[in-house]
Image (tube, grey):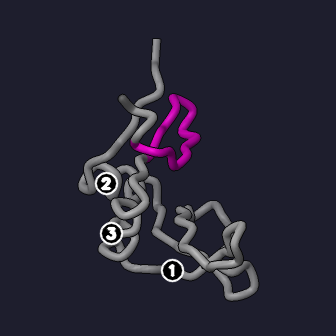
């Protein structure tokens, strides 16, 4: 039986995403106080192209992974290949 697993190591996250023809992206979205914060996303080849219209911008892996660490997030993957970014505090 397959189980959901969570990736925290940069190398593992980047390998999983690139292996599925994905790339990092970021959008600046307002929080509840109106301050803009970075929202991390992953885009895959089967998804539509990143455009200025959707508010997403491609970014480098180093910038994306630095923001992942700053926000204390991890990549949770289920057996179907679905994924989500989750707080690392929920891992313990």
The CA span between labels 2 and 3 is 16 Å
Q: Which residue is mark 2?
A: 15
- Image position of 29 (left or right of 64): right
Q: Give the x, y percent position of residue 31.
A: 67, 69
Q: Magenta includes 81?
A: yes
Position above or below: 43 against 53: above
Q: Give the x, y percent position of residue 17.
A: 42, 56
Please tell me whether mark 3 or mark 1 is closer to you in this view. 3
Secondary structure beneath dot 3 equals helix
Position above or below: 15 against 70: above
State the residue in front, 73 or 33. Answer: 33
Work out which residue is located at the far front of the displayed protein and give it: 33
Which comes sooner in the sequence, label 1 or label 2? 2
**Residue at 58% across / 40% down in the picture?**
82
State the residue in front, 82 or 33. Answer: 33
Q: Give the x, y percent position of residue 33.
A: 69, 72
- Is the residue marked by circle 1 packed among few (<14), some (14-19), or many (20+) residues within 10 Å? some
Q: Which residue is mark 1?
A: 58
State the residue in front, 12 or 70. Answer: 70
Q: Which residue is mark 3?
A: 66
Secondary structure beneath dot 2 equals helix
Q: Magenta includes 4?
A: no
- Is the residue marked by circle 3 packed among few (<14), some (14-19), or many (20+) residues within 10 Å? few
Which segment did they paint magenta? 75-88
**Residue at 48% across / 38% down in the picture?**
77
**Residue at 69% across / 81% down in the picture?**
55
Position above or below: 24 against 79: below
The CA span between labels 1 and 2 is 17 Å
């Amino acid at each position: 039986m397959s189980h959901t697993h969570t990736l925290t190591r940069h190398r593992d996250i980047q390998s999983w995403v690139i292996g599925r023809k994905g790339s990092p992206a970021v959008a600046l979205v307002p929080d509840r106080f109106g301050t803009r914060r970075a929202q991390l996303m992953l885009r895959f080849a089967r998804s539509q192209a990143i455009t200025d219209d959707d508010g997403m911008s491609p970014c480098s892996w180093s910038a994306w992974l630095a923001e992942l660490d700053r926000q204390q997030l991890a990549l949770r993957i289920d057996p179907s290949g679905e994924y989500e970014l989750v707080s690392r505090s929920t891992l313990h």
